[in-house]
Amino acid sequence: MAQVRIESLRKEYDVGTVVAVDDLNLEIEDGEFVTVVGPSGCGKTTTLRMLAGLEEPTSGTIAIGGEDVTDVHAKNRDVAMVFQNYALYPHKTVFENMAFGLRMSTDMSAEEREQQVVETAEMMDIEGLLEDKPDQLSGGQKQRVALGRAIVREPDVFLFDEPLSNLDAKLRTTMRAEIQRLQNELGITAVYVTHDQHEAMTMGDRIVILDGGELQQVGKPTHVYENPVNEFVGGFIGSPSMNFLEVDVDERGDTVHLTGLEEEFDFELSGTYVDRHAGALEADRYTLGIRPESVDFTEDTRNSITAGVSVVEPVGSDNYLHLDLAGEFIARVSPEIEPQPGDDVTLTFDESDIHLFDPKTGRDVLGPTKEPPTMATS
Ligand code: ADP
Ligand code: MG
């Protein structure tokens, strides 16, 4: 196992017309499981392929276990990659697929090799499939074999590129737990790419969020959830998504008022707020962000606003109330709160749950509310 250090990594395609990865800096600890998430085309696969040595960086360096491997050929890097499409050899048996990597990379005896494959197959619960060919296997079994083939080599670093995307929802949950079990048992260093923020949040020791080839934020999932550095991260992480409202901020003494909805809505904050990046909070247009679970219902008229209920969406553990409030706005409430469509509700927010994003920079000017963020980009 090994630490991974990525410095100023950049990848351009088509002579610079596409910047797939832009000045990426990231350190991954030995034994750490890092998830990388972002929308399609944000540079996730390109980053992994550079780590694997399958793609040459335009500039920057990659070190694994303290050794600069930027110019080391893929087959001489001690990494294993697990792909979405499994990438098994169709004409080889499961046993041969798993043993192949070992044959390439080690000089162990045939007996040792067989023993290691069988042990790994037992760990992955596929020992009954060793003589089968890939086309005899289900999608879930193929993914187990692909994982087994990676594990049997005992690589320094595991790279996963959306490995569960081709599986149905139930199997995905099973395999997610399986990968986490392996992570606990083997203490593997892993970079796990997914477009699914839920998967990234639940699996990662730390989560890395990319957009447009640029690192947006890196940190522990709960920290990032509570302290998104910008509007993109706030909106990307969490389901249902964070609500956004356009507001005007006026400065009056030690109170900041927010207005800007169709219905007048002054939210009086309890103290003087400053833009933690720029100093004084400018009287200007901002985007207020509030998570669906941070919406409270109130009888009180202070800091409250009335909204019509358009849809009540019961999801079992919660009700999602779709409210008519400057576009799409969802409140996540307990199932006992069940207004009817057409009803009016009065709602408010706790001051500490509010995010205020500067539309010019996208940054949360009030945050972080709880602890310093891990600022990713300068
Ligand atoms: P993701 O895996 O996050 O969906 P990718 O890393 O595959 O994103 O792609 C990042 C960007 O680089 C995209 O704009 C994509 O079109 C571009 N890209 C990826 N591979 C190539 C390539 N071989 N040639 C040209 N452009 C590429
Ligand atoms: Mg990809």
Image: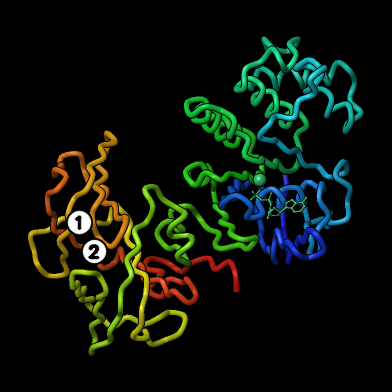
Q: Where does the image place residue 328, in percent across and percent down from the top left?
A: 32, 55
267 displayed left or right of 361: left
From the image, tell me which residue sits under label 2.
350
Give the tally of numbered discs. Answer: 2
Q: In the displayed structure, would residue 243 be above or below residue 158?
A: below
Q: Are marks 1 and 2 in contact (CB under 8 Å)?
A: yes
Give the x, y percent position of residue 87.
74, 30
Q: Amino acid at mark 1?
A: Asp
Measured as percent of width and height from the top left, residue 106 is found at 88, 31
What number is the disc on residue 326? none
Q: Residue at x 24, y 86 (%)?
A: 254
Q: Nearer the viewer, residue 13 or 215?
A: 13
Ligand 2, by image quadrant, is top right
Q: Amino acid at mark 2?
A: Asp
Residue, disc 1: 296
In depth, the one of 224 and 216 nearer the eye is 216
Q: Is residue 129 shown left or right of residue 307?
A: right
Within 10 angstroms of label 1, few (less than 14), some, or many (20 or more) residues? some
